[in-house]
Amino acid sequence: MKYKFKTKPYEHQLKALEMSWSKSYFAYFMEMGTGKSKVLLDNIAMLYDQGKINGALIIAPKGVIGTWYKQEIPTHLPDHIENETILWQANITKGQSQKLGRLFKVGEELHVLIMNVEAFSTQKGVAFASKFLMSHNTLMAVDESTTIKNPGAKRTKNICNLSSRARYKRILTGSPVTKSPLDLFKQCEFLETELLGHVSYYTFRTRYAVMKTANFGGRSVQIVVGYRNLEELSEKLKPFSYRVLKDDCLDLPAKTYMKRIVKLTPEQEKVYKQMKHLALAEMEGKVMSTATVLTQLMRLQQINCGHFTADDGTIKPIKNNRIKELLDTLEEIHGKVVIWAHYQYDVETIVEHLKEEYGDNSFVTYYGKTPMSERQDNIQKFQDPDSPVRFLVGTTQTGGYGITLTAASTMIYYSNGYDLEKRQQSEARIDRIGQKFPMTYIDLMVEDTVDERIVKALRKKVNIATKIMGEELKAWI
């Protein structure tokens, strides 16, 4: 069909659209950094132009709903499409209620509702989504669809139940099988019941998993010990899916920068405000040196990361969402990943969770506490394509210089320092001779805090430590 793109598509994006745009259901199995959001928005626009839909419900994790609203839709949805786009918020104020009401006004515009996947664990969220689906001819899409892989989760059940009310359905994920081929069942059930030939998760499991009876505390349970018939399963996916790996997309830009937004917990918000007020009180009426203000900024950033240093010098943890956002991001990435953190405490937190999620042999470290005798060996393990090591976790202070990590084309900054040289040098660890693929750099950050200020400055190549004076930094706090 004739369609005027707002932003020029890459070859793999065109192929994805050609395969999917008019189909009732489709799966974009496209790795992070390959532009699956643009593909979905072009698909929505095509269907709207054809008079097939007048509504779109986009479901995504908390860390990316803001990106959909502020960046993806304004960038890629064609200008000729008048739209009413609303971002769902659980705390519905009078103003928010008026905004949400605009989604139900009769008109020619495209109505777009963006909701976080967690909202579907609540009665309020499910009821509103249901009303929206009943009011429009809708395309319903789940971004990072591994969030609905758990057959027992309330949100999975609710989203799958609602899907029957959508005219078109799409799932988007970079890694449809995060830990097991069984992850596919609910994602595909969302698209269409019995799409994989099974009405029940348990018959699906029987077909594709090798089960063993184990005894725990006198109770017999069935556990998965292996998988079978995977070639058959792969063939079943082909008619309604398209798989894209970043490493296969040679026309992508050399570097792509992305953000994952982390929400502060109530505990963090409380401590952050206390620390902020204390810092401002200390600075009141004084001309502060840059070094002094940077110290205050780092204390605030520590809180964003989920910990703070008490008066006695001990580090105290704070309940936070940052590590969960990292793990959710890793589920979307294929292949090896370098993860940088500014604080040693963060490195140790990351390692603890990687061990739990991916196993003892899934990672190596490169930071101050990594013994000198092990550092080169850790690099070799990471660079070895046959090694089980998938992650290198370190600090830019220790690992950001001189080493080659080209086995990875993705780098995540769990937390940033303020030194531009360390940032640029650390980015270059994967951008060296031997790198064959486009690179993706991802920053985890909390909006409207020092986190966001630091990331913006570093991306603009501003050396915070030397180019911004103490009085300017005070405004950041």
Image (cartoon, rainbow, N blue to C red):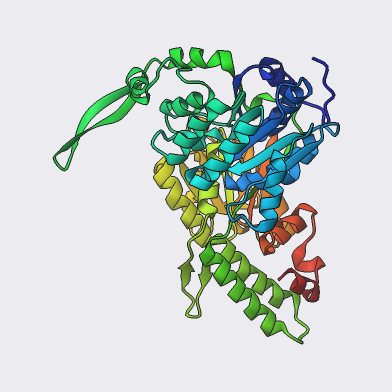
* Residue 257 visible within the image: no
> Viewer-proximal residue, 382 or 325?
325
Taking the spot 63% from the left edge, 80% from the top edge, the residue there is 278
> Viewer-proximal residue, 341 or 24?
24
Q: Is residue 467 above or below residue 324?
A: below
Q: Is residue 450 above or below residue 20?
A: below
Direction from residue 78 to residue 399 in the image, left or right:
left
Taking the spot 77% from the left edge, 75% from the top edge, the residue there is 470
Q: Quadrant of the N terminus?
A: top right
Q: Is residue 267 above or below residue 251?
A: below
Q: Residue 383, percent across and down?
A: 55, 37
Which residue is situated farthest in the bottom direction here? Answer: 285
* Residue 98 visible within the image: yes
Q: Residue 51 sits in which quadrant?
A: top right
Q: Residue 405, percent across and down?
A: 61, 41
Taking the spot 47% from the left edge, 56% from the top edge, the residue there is 349
Q: Is residue 469 above or below residue 251?
A: below
Total marks placed = 0
Direction from residue 190 to residue 83 in the image, left or right:
right
Q: Residue 463, percent across and down?
A: 78, 61
> Viewer-proximal residue, 317 or 423?
317
Which residue is situated farthest in the left direction here? Answer: 218
> Viewer-proximal residue, 447 or 151?
151
Q: Quadrant of the C terminus?
A: bottom right
